[in-house]
Image: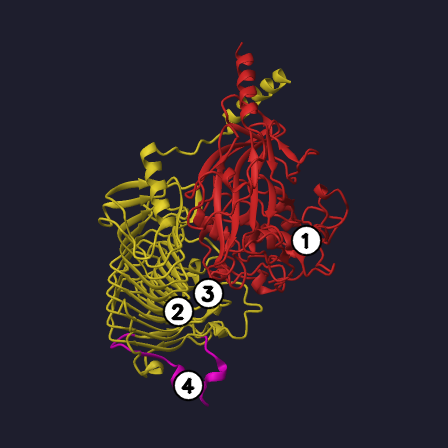
Chain colours: A red, B yellow
Amino acid sequence: MRGLASIIVLAVLLGSCGQATRPVTVHAADSPPALLSDWGIVFANGRTFALNEGVTPYDLNTPLFTDYALKLRTVWMPPGASAAYTTDGALDFPVGTIISKTFHYEKSADPEDGSLLAVRADRESALNVDGVLDLDEVALVETRLLVRYDDGWRALPYVWNAAQTDATLEIAGDYRQVSLVDGTEVQNIVYVVPDMNQCSGCHVTDHTAKQLQPIGPKAWQLNREYSWWGNDASQLENWSTRGLLHGFDGDAPAGVRWSAPGDATLAQRARAYLDANCAHCHNPSGAADTSALHLNIDAPLGRLYGVCKPPVAVGRGSGDRPFDIFPGRPEESIMVFRMQHTDPAIAMPELGRSAVHAEGVRLVSDWISTLNGDC
Amino acid sequence: MRTSRLAFLAAVALVAACTREEPAQPDAAAMAFEKQLQTQLITAQPGDVITIPAGVHPISRGLSLNVSGVTIRGEGMDKSILSFAGQLQGAEGLLVNASDFTIEDLAIEDTPGDGLKVNEGRNIIIRRVRTEWTNGPDENNGAYGIYPVQGENVLVEECVAIAASDAGIYVGQSRNVVVRNNRAERNVAGIEIENTFYADVYGNVTNENTGGILVFNMPDLPQPGHSTRVYQNTVVGNNTDNFGAEGTPVASVPAGSGIVINSNDKVEIFDNEVRDNDTANIIISSYYATGWEGMRDMGEEYDPYPETIYIYGNRMSGGGSSPDGLDLKALKVAMFGLNGALPDVLWDGYFNADKVDADGNLLPDYAICVDNGEAEVLNADLPNGSSDIVVGAAQHNCGHEKLAPVALEAPLG
């Protein structure tokens, strides 16, 4: 009987809300809408999550880890506009660009109390053959927008409702209890949706200029195939062909996928991982330049990359270890210690790390093991 | 499918029951306050004054401010209390990335990481703020209480900092700094000035820390530091066991250190009351003596030697009677007897061999000068394995031109 009632309710919902009916709208910087659907980028109706016409999904070679959440990334540019190709930071997107990133989990079970039991898997988000996410399979947590205005980028965190029909702007952030399930192991974490200032904590990569920037969509990060295009060409080529990118002559820096041993050397993968997870703060003009530890992918592998570098203001984050990177000795390297902990005084990165990224710890440890020399 | 999921769920619940550690859930009113406060901070406009009412306010995630020209004001450091004992996320209690910032009359308690960090701002006033770990000294306390870094024109006054596992008040990589009339006690370091140009530290009470007042220069950082005046402070009984994490610079500070200069230049120490610090009332050392590792590839621009040091007119007594560390204990007993004491000033003996005269003494411009009545200096001669330890004042009988007072610029000055 109850089951019948819920079917009827579902039918009513389906009848009243179709998918993707609104045009994309770039709202004024000082009046962002309360609902995500008002942007017209992505929509959900409780059964599926879909992208609007003209919204392009993409993926990165080596993404930032966030508590094992899956991330669906999209970009939309005003009709006729396109990004300028550059290898200096992120692509140069035109005014009016809206980048979205939707954090979701693959459901391990669907308990009636609404709690979130998620598969703890280190994999990429993927739209299914219909170009949607099936909400029987995944649970939406939050969607973050980066919007390019005349005077720079703005960041907006939207949190999905329980019915999975829309998301609400939460400038002070939010929490979500998540149980990460791996076989018979369950790890309970508090997933923290960042507040608007915390968006800047990562996206202000130059702490002196204090301007928000996209971090992910760099040439080396986008230089990979993506199944949505239905071909083997790289995203950069597909973007170029479809008029989303100009100035690209086909010659891009190699994409390094942190998780794919066949693609690159261990060192390349570890350094790609450290760039994606650390360098938004740990670069020569970043918020963490106070520590003089620079982990950007083009930084030389020396003392300021952490090799034999004693800490400066680390507190108990040192773990009683002498150097950030102790060649050959991951178990004596502060970098590994901080990746292995979730205590806010110790954990690195500082945000999105209620869980330890075991696969990342392994990669960086394996790489440090191969380094020669003594301090 | 339904059945199997339910069965699985039951299994999960069983496992979860054994492993689950529910984070403390603050009550609804506290959560509402926190959300409102963070919203105020995020949406602040220049000129705003954000008030913190009296009461203990539990905060569960790091607060931050990115807008310049904002004042945060409580009703008193013992009345308006932000308590971070249940903090789930954030390396600081309050992180400020802005200029023209004033914070006053409130307390920040029990943060897992740093209490108040102000990163890269101009015209910073931190006044009558208390940062405290209420459980007292503990290696699991957060590192820094009050932590302005890469600031310019910075005033820290009438604050209280207690039980930080690194420094209670730490000013790093800054320029034009005044730290006055604060109380810092039972921290590893009471007050630390690091890699900073032009700092005046005066009128402070720094008692019962591991080390009272530190003036350090660390390698690798964007700027070295020099020109710090430490005067009219009370630095008594800093004999708390060092509870800093190994690997951190302050972990090398021996318990019983009054005022410590490490690798910094142009430091003037005068008119302080410094007593009963069991290792020494004043320690002058180089990076080489700290036991800090990683001296390889230190960077040629880094100067590890303390130079142009001037100590005069301090009231010193009762120090050096029970130094921390076996080497110093043995040294004390050998040279001064069981009931004796090390002199008021300890120097490790490292100096730059490129800056000496024909007799091998430091050139006058760089000398360590001690003109302080009866106070004597022990040169531990560490570079030569302590083979030629010298005690006396004659070698340091000199002076330097006095440093100019720090002039804070408007609107602070």
Magenta residue check for B362: yes
Q: Is there CB contact under 8 Å for labels 4 and 3? A: no
Please, what is the dominant secondary structure of the magenta stretch?
loop
Picture layout, residue B155 above or below residue B89: below
Between B171 and B303, the residue placed more toward the observer is B171
First along the sequence among labels 4 and 3: 3
Magenta residue check for B19: no
Select label 4 or label 2 by which is in front.
2
Which quarter of the picture shows residue A283? Answer: bottom right
Under circle 3, the secondary element is loop
Q: Which mark is residue B196?
A: 2
Task: State the separation of the CA atoms marked 1 and 2.
Answer: 51 Å
Q: Quadrant of the N terminus of chain B?
A: top right
Task: State the separation of the CA atoms marked 4 and 2.
Answer: 24 Å
Q: Which mark is residue A71?
A: none
Q: Which mark is residue B290?
A: 3
**Residue under mark 4: which chain is it in?**
B
Between A227 and A360, the residue placed more toward the observer is A227
Task: State the separation of the CA atoms marked 1 and 3.
Answer: 60 Å
Q: Which mark is residue A243?
A: 1
Which quarter of the picture shows residue B266? Answer: bottom left
Residue type, label 2: Thr
Percent of width and height locating residue B284: 38, 71
**Residue under mark 1: which chain is it in?**
A
First along the sequence among labels 4 and 2: 2
Q: Identify the residue position indicated by label 4 in the image.
A: B363
Percent of width and height locating residue B151: 38, 65
Q: Is there CB contact under 8 Å for labels 1 and 4? A: no
